[in-house]
């Protein structure tokens, strides 16, 4: 035990007023807004400060739960207003709650004196105990996760480097073996998910006769040790069902989108030719990532500044009528203040974290404004990257003589044109998307506030609004169906990184049993590798995604502007013509669909 000498034998944490922990803000700030004190043992009897003053023996016991010496206690009253029977749980003093005839009790009593002359029900303590327990468990989980990162960070970096190398290798092979690579990875994903279904079923079957394995997840409740859930049959059954649904969805997509997949493969081959002339486009996502990192850092610093700008607010509390009750006070000099002189029995107690200025009153609004600016700036950066890449690939398409007519630095030239001529369009488009996103955030905030409401109509209306704005956001983001196919085909790489990370960190493979670090939660590095691999793969293959979309739209514009005559020749390559248009009959059939789609 590390701490001041006077606290060496005080190994338990005592809350002055556990009911202060009932505030929902405790779950956001991870801090209970009441004085906390290290004590040698938890209180075992009911007692109030007012009554303890009249009995020297009781006061001698009571001062064990006060902050300072007897002199300061008498002067500043740095004591809890009440004591209730408590039990030690993970070195914290929690009220000794129980049930008697279906009624919550504390210390075998259904009520208690709150030290301010009020009789409170024992059930009023329940929410405070629950929140304090959640905060305690959350802190333990965070500490364990931090320890896992310190033990596995180098393996995580190795996994991310492997994912980057695989992405580069995949991009190089796509230039020569696009069709084969895509079909191999699709078949491999189906096979891996099939193996996952088999493995989860075998785990489910192996727990058939194990004691306690048939308990339901609802009965099990929440535990910070997630390995407990792997010892329950219902967990593995849920995995089997989820993987089976994913497998069926992928197979159905392959059946119904097989023609589109063939077109996508052919377009990827053409995109590989375009990227070959501008390899710097493969590294442009790094520049976008750098700008996004700056935006995220600015948002995070501002959010932390706003969250930590609250001050400890103290209020005057008196058991008798006092004109200053509820007024703000300063505990440092309250004993010599005018308010103390006029109300000798009053105390300057901690009330909450916050403030009473105009700035503090609108702190939540400022947080929402900060989130809105974050969405706007992030969407602008993403839109700038998309327009820059689209402009570069458009310069490839509209170059009549390739590569002679392609600009020397196509990506940077396109970014310059975007900033010079289209900044307003980028900002306006980002603004529309940001408004939709901030409305969704506000709806989620309202949904959180109305969780305890019984108004079914309000819940239904809120759910409908959330669904509508989710659909609107997706419609704004993805207006081309081909983007879904590219995401399905090109972002499957991170899945294999996740599978490899699972077998490595979980110790399921004997070859890695002694190499893998000893962790509290092996899913921490697994999720980190999976998410990191996804971001890396998405960064590389989003270039292909943008290239395919740009070439397709340029092909449509080419058909509208030109007719293939010597005066107005087509700019499309022979490969694109073979993919999307076969002969004059194909052109006649394709043009009405273009006008219809407009």
Image: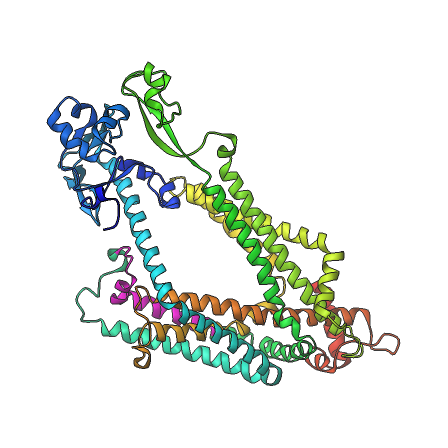
Residue 424 percent across, percent down from the top left:
72, 52
Q: Does the rendering let one see residue 255?
A: no
**Residue 557 image point, x, y percent:** 76, 68
Residue 586 in percent (x, y) is at 73, 78
Q: How is the image coloured?
A: rainbow
Query: Quick one: quadrant of the C terminus?
Result: bottom right
130 lies above or below 183: above
Q: Quadrant of residue 401?
A: bottom right
Q: Residue at x 53, y 53 (%)?
A: 297
Where residue 487 sits, quadrant-wise, is: bottom right
Q: Nearer the viewer, residue 416 or 594?
A: 416
**Image coordinates for residue 529, horizontal then vertical, percent:** 43, 69
Q: How many labels does the image show?
A: 0
* Pick the front one: 367 or 354: 354
Q: Is residue 15 left or right of residue 184?
A: left
Q: Judge whether 498 appears above or below 379 on screen.
A: below
User: Would residue 5 be seen by someone viewing this image from the given angle?
Assistant: yes
Q: Residue at x 36, y 18 (%)?
A: 339
Question: Main SS type for the magenta part?
Answer: helix
In the image: residue 586, left or right of residue 19:
right
Q: Is 375 one of the magenta-colored residues?
A: no
Q: Residue 55 vs residue 21: left or right?
A: left
Q: In the rendered structure, which segment of residues is drawn in magenta?
A: 221-250
Furthest-right residue in this view: 567
Nearest the viewer among 130 and 548 is 130
Residue 239 painted magenta: yes
- Residue 160 vs 22, above or below: the answer is below
Q: Which residue lies furthest to the top in this view?
A: 342
Residue at coordinates 39% horizontally, 39% vertically from top-left? 453
Between 55 and 257, which is closer to the camera in this rendering?
55
């Amino acid at each position: 035990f590390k701490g001041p000498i006077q606290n060496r034998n005080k190994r338990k944490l005592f809350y002055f007023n556990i009911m202060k922990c009932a505030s929902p803000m405790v779950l956001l700030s991870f801090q209970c807004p009441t004085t906390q004190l290290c004590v040698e043992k938890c209180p075992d009897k009911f007692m109030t400060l007012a009554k303890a003053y009249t009995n020297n023996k009781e006061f001698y016991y009571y001062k064990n739960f006060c902050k300072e010496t007897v002199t300061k206690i008498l002067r500043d009253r740095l004591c809890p207003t009440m004591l209730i029977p408590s039990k030690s749980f993970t070195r914290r003093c929690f009220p000794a709650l129980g049930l008697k005839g279906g009624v919550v009790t504390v210390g075998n009593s259904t009520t208690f004196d709150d030290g301010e002359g009020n009789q409170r029900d024992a059930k009023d303590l329940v929410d405070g105990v629950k929140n304090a327990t959640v905060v305690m468990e959350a802190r333990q989980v965070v500490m364990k996760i931090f320890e896992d990162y310190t033990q596995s960070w180098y393996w995580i970096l190795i996994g991310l480097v492997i994912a980057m190398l695989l992405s580069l290798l995949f991009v190089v092979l796509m230039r020569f073996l696009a069709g084969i690579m895509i079909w191999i990875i699709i078949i491999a994903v189906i096979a891996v998910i099939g193996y996952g279904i088999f493995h989860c079923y075998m785990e489910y079957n192996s727990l058939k006769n194990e004691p306690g394995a048939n308990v339901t997840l609802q009965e099990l409740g929440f535990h910070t040790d997630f390995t407990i859930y792997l010892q329950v049959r219902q967990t593995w059954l849920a995995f089997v069902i989820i993987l089976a649904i994913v497998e069926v969805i992928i197979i159905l997509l392959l059946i119904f989108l097989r023609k589109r997949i063939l077109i996508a493969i052919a377009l990827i081959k053409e995109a590989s030719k375009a990227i070959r002339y501008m390899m710097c486009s493969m590294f442009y996502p790094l520049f976008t990532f750098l700008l996004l990192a700056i935006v995220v850092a600015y948002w995070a610093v501002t959010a932390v500044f706003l969250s930590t700008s609250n001050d400890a607010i103290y209020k005057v509390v008196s058991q008798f009528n006092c004109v200053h009750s509820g007024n703000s006070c300063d505990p440092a000099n309250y004993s010599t203040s005018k308010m103390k002189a006029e109300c000798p029995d009053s105390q300057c107690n901690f009330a909450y974290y916050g403030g009473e200025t105009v700035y503090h009153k609108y702190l939540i609004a400022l947080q929402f404004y900060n989130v809105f600016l974050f969405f706007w700036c992030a969407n602008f950066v993403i839109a700038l990257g998309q327009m820059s890449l689209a402009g570069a690939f458009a310069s490839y398409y509209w170059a009549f003589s390739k590569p002679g007519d392609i600009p020397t630095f196509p990506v940077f030239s396109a970014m310059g044109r975007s900033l010079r001529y289209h900044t307003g369009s980028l900002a306006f488009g980002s603004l529309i998307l940001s408004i939709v996103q901030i409305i969704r955030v506000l709806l989620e905030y309202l949904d959180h506030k109305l969780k305890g409401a019984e108004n079914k109509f309000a819940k239904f209306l809120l759910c409908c609004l959330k669904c509508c704005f989710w659909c609107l956001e997706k419609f704004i983001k993805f207006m081309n169906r081909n983007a879904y196919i590219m995401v399905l085909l090109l972002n499957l790489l991170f899945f294999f990184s996740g599978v490899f990370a699972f077998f490595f960190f979980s110790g399921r493979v004997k070859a890695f049993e002694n190499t893998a670090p000893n962790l509290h939660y092996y899913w921490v590095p697994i999720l980190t590798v999976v998410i990191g691999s996804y971001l890396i793969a998405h960064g590389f293959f989003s270039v292909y995604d943008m290239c395919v979309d740009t070439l397709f739209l340029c092909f449509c514009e080419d058909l509208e502007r030109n007719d293939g005559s010597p005066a107005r020749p087509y700019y499309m390559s022979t490969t694109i013509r073979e993919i999307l248009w076969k002969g004059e009959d194909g052109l006649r059939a394709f043009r009405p669909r273009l006008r219809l789609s407009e």
